[in-house]
Image (cartoon, helix red, strand yellow):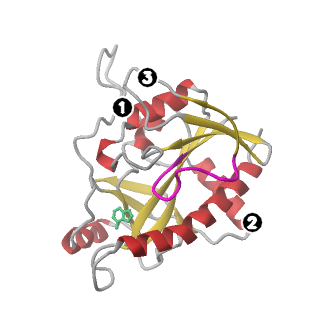
Amino acid sequence: MTLAIIGGTGLTQIAELSITGEQTLETPFGSPSAPYVFGELNGHSLIFLARHGNPHRIPPHKINYRANIWGLHQLGATEIIGVAAVGGIGAAMEPAKIAIPTQLIDYSYGREHTFFADELEHVTHIDFTEPYTPSLRQRILRAANTAGIEVYDGGVYGCTQGPRLETIAEIKRMANDGCDLVGMTGMPEAALARELEIPYANISVVANWAAGIVDGEITMAEIEKNLLTGMSNAIKLLKATVLSSPT
Ligand code: HPA
């Protein structure tokens, strides 16, 4: 088993990872966001990729999601955990908290979102009833429980286009649609992993209340402060998950 972690805003590297190597790749779909970092955590080998590049420079709508996932497949990743900063819509999704969503709605557009576009022998439709692999989600939840890390089990992740944050009306619409969380990078990442049949789950770290959930504007200072706490818990959760993973 080789677990891969895709780190988002606030998680460009994992300091606890003892690095054993690094690889820059080209894929038929172009260049991934950054070199893949190979490392060991608690005796388990894993692959880390900084979704926005390292340093953090690629905005959500410009990320080459296909190259990122293809590269992980080429390197033999057998499961992927995507970590993402999000805004909280649902009452339980307080800033600095962590959620392990079960569902998603995709509001993004214009992104290269499938491997099944060209030179097909036949048209392919993946099943996406459960966008996050239930068994991987359960492992993360069990690890959280064992390590005493508070996480919210469930939630609907809504993926917006970015890079701007949303309007109050947009968040109201998303709440009406059933979204609990709003982020910009959850799709097409999850669907591409499914197309290549790689189990995939998401760890969402709440950076702020989404627009209009509380009064006032959303500030970068607020986002950075909450991510500092939230991501340090997410790293603990990743470590606990890795510890409980089959080697
Ligand atoms: N909206 C979209 N993406 C985000 C947010 C938000 O409020 N916070 C962090 N990522």
The quadrant of the picture occupied by the N terminus is top right
Instruction: Say if residue 138 shows up in the picture.
Output: yes
| Mark 3: secondary structure | loop
Location of mark 1 (residue): 125
For disc 2, the marked residue is 147
In this view, the residue farthest toward the front is 55
Badge 2 amino acid: Ala
Regarding residue 208, the answer to whether it shows in the image is no
Number of disc labels: 3
**Residue 7 is inside the magenta segment:** yes
Image quadrant occupied by the C terminus:
top right
- 116 is higher (above) or lower (below) than 139: above
Foreground mark, 2 or 1, reads 2
Residue 187 in the image: above or below residue 228? above
Q: What SS does tag 2 mark? A: helix
Q: Type of residue at label 1? A: His
Q: Which percent across, then down, holds residue 139?
A: 67, 53
- Image: 235 above or below 58: below
The part of the chain drawn in magenta is 6-17
Where in the image, quadrant-wise, is ligand 1 located? bottom left
